[in-house]
Amino acid sequence: MTNKILTILLSAIFSISAISLVAQDKADRVLGKWLNEEGDAHVEITKSGDVYSGKLVWLKFPTDDKTGKPKLDKKNPDDALKSRPVLGLEMLSGFKYDSDDDEWTDGEIYDPKSGKTYSSFMEFDSDGKLKIRGYIGISLIGRTTYWTAVK
């Protein structure tokens, strides 16, 4: 009788652990390098604790045409940040995985081309592309972009 109870208890613990690992794998599938829709940048998404963020790790044209120097964050509304390089810039921040909706929510996306920051969420589309929606206020007012995984 004791062996049966022990077997049932161990099976339950193993099942809970396996479910937990599957959920974590699902959450972490966003990790890695992504090519933006325009094809001119790679963003690497990483995780710290349960928060996902992403920074620019490659640019097709990393230097300014006029100066020949690295591109700077010139459009940033904060004057103190206008001199920082675009390469290495954190574009995605604060995302948390929502297992109920299978998406990453409560994040922000920064667009260095406009200098604007938007509320954002991410999810995968049926083709395996990363769908990123940036918006102001409610998600109906915004723009969606699709990124593909860098192999």
Image (cartoon, rainbow, N blue to C red):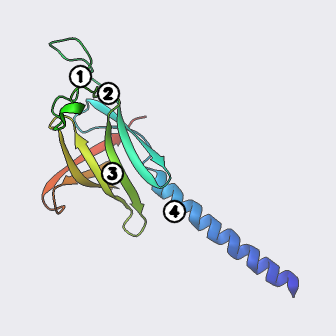
Which one is closest to the eye, mark 3 or mark 4? Answer: 4
Query: Are dots 3 and 2 in contact, CB under 8 Å?
Result: no
Q: Look at 48% across and 48% down and name the residue there.
A: 48
Cα distance in 3D space between marks 3 and 2 = 28 Å
Q: Amino acid at mark 4?
A: Ala
Considering the image in quadrants, where does the N terminus appear? Answer: bottom right
Which residue has dot 2 on it? 87
Identify the element where label 2 is drawn: loop
Identify the element where label 4 is drawn: helix
Q: Amino acid at mark 1?
A: Lys
Q: Is residue 19 left or right of residue 26?
A: right
Cα distance in 3D space between marks 1 and 3 = 33 Å
Q: Check the image and report above or below for 86 versus 99.
A: above
Query: Are dots 2 and 1 in contact, CB under 8 Å?
Result: yes
Percent across and percent down for residue 53 are 38, 46
Residue 125: in sight, yes or no? no
Which residue has dot 3 on it? 127
Classed neighbour count for the residue bearing mark 1: other residues with Cα under 10 Å, few (<14), some (14–19), many (≥20): some
Query: Are dots 2 and 4 in contact, CB under 8 Å?
Result: no
Percent across and percent down for residue 19 are 58, 67
Of the numbered discs in the image, which one, if any, rests on residue 71?
1
Cα distance in 3D space between marks 3 and 4 = 20 Å
| Residue farthest along the bottom direction in this orientation | 1
Asked whether 151 or 20 is in front, the reply is 20
Q: Look at 32% across and 45% down and name the residue there.
A: 92
Q: Amino acid at mark 2?
A: Leu
Asked whether 1 or 135 is in front, the reply is 135
Cα distance in 3D space between marks 2 and 4 = 32 Å
Percent across and percent down for residue 105 are 33, 59
Cα distance in 3D space between marks 2 and 1 = 7 Å
